[in-house]
Image: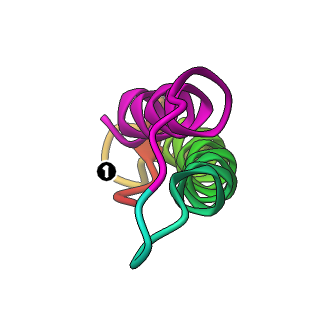
Amino acid sequence: MSIGFGVFLFVVGAILAFAVNVEFDWIALSTVGWILMAAGVITVIIGIVLLARRRQSISTTRSAVDPASGEQVTRRENLSDPL
């Protein structure tokens, strides 16, 4: 969701910076556009970093011998990072 929101911010900022030719005395729309584009890029970068962290997994394999029956027991765990 954060990647899509970052792209949305970037597109709205580009429209305000390059396509709108309206001038107001109290606000510069081109400056607001540049700020929104920068915020969009930062949001996309943070979204990619969080997505990469979320996809990491931990794999553990343990082997042991059951003392009662003499069988070898192998246990595998695949854990995903909760963030």
Q: Tell me where residue 52 appears, x and y as whole percent.
A: 64, 40
Circle 1 — which element?
loop
Q: Which residues are magenta?
A: 1-23
7 inside magenta stretch: yes
Residue at 39% x, 43% y is 2
> Badge 1 local density, few (<14 within 10 Å), some, or many (20+)?
few
User: Nearest the camera: 64 or 15?
Assistant: 15
Residue 16: horizontal and vertical position, in percent? Answer: 51, 37
Any part of residue 38 in sight:
yes
Residue nearest the viewer, comparing 4 with 19: 19
> Which residue is label 1 attached to?
68
Majority SS type along the magenta span: helix
Let me know if residue 20 is in the magenta part: yes
Residue at the spot x=34%, y=58% of the render? Answer: 82
Q: Looking at the image, which is closer to me, 12 or 59? A: 12
Three-letter amino acid code of the residue under disc 1: Ala
Quarter of the image containing the C terminus?
bottom left
Identified at 41% across, 61% down, the residue is 24
Instruction: Give the answer, above or below, for where 14 lies relative to 68.
Output: above
Instruction: Judge whether 72 appears above or below 52 on screen.
Output: above
